Image: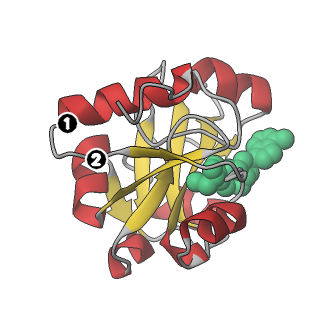
Amino acid sequence: MADAALSPSARRVQDLLDAFGRGHRVVEFAAPTRTSQEAADAVGCTVAQIAKSLIFRTRDSGRPVLVVASGANRVNEKAVALHFAAELGGERFQRADPEFVRSATGFAIGGVPPIGHTVPPIVLIDEDLARHEPIWAAAGTPNAVFRLSFDELVAITGGVVGPVV
Ligand code: 5CA
């Protein structure tokens, strides 16, 4: 089988994609896909087509917040807090440190996928990703990605769509 050699973290993502049941395949590259630019270079797509999975935490309750953003966008935390106030319970939120990312998601920075996190996060999705087809997301390691559509991203994450910039 072509993906018999997937590393354990990428295998976990592939198993979730199998359960989703629409034939999505994790692709592992020899080159790094640790950043949006590297992922775009490896795939041969634009950086805007990369769906980066950024981890934040609510300031008071410490809940993980996953913002899935276009690789071309710089997330504006104030805009996100304002637009998604309901989802965030009115709380402020802040960038998570690497240890929080690891414990909340089960994955290391550079390979965090939008699915399969240890602690189910609040999921906020960049509306700009809807303008791109297909999009590519990290698949558990700094060398692995998978291709999907915007509608599939919303369906598989159960996220709420809105502006992040
Ligand atoms: N695999 C690629 C393409 S999907 C990827 O994961 N890109 S990413 O942008 O989602 O992941 C890298 C992100 O990790 C950076 O954008 C940055 O937001 C975050 N990051 C990098 N270093 C740190 C750090 N020290 N603490 C918290 N977050 C970090």
Q: Is residue 86 left or right of residue 140?
A: left
* Residue wearing tag 1: 20
* Disc number for residue 24: 2
Q: Can you tell which quarter of the image residue 13 is in?
A: top left
Q: Is residue 107 visible?
A: yes
Q: Nearer the viewer, mark 2 or mark 1?
A: 2
Dot 1 surroundings within 10 Å: few (below 14), some, or many (20 or more)?
few
Mark 2 and mark 1: Cα distance apart in space? 8 Å
Dot 2: what SS? Answer: loop
Dot 1: what SS? Answer: helix
Looking at the image, which is closer to me, 33 or 114? 33
Q: Is residue 151 left or right of residue 43?
A: left
- Residue at the location (50% across, 41% down)? 139
x and y percentages locating residue 153 in the rendered image: 31, 54
Q: Is residue 75 visible?
A: no
Q: Is the Cβ of the residue at disc 2 closer than 8 Å to that at disc 1?
A: yes
What's the amino acid at mark 2? His
Q: Is residue 129 above or below residue 69?
A: below
Q: Quadrant of the N terminus?
A: top left
x and y percentages locating residue 111 in the rendered image: 62, 40
Looking at the image, which is closer to me, 120 or 113? 113
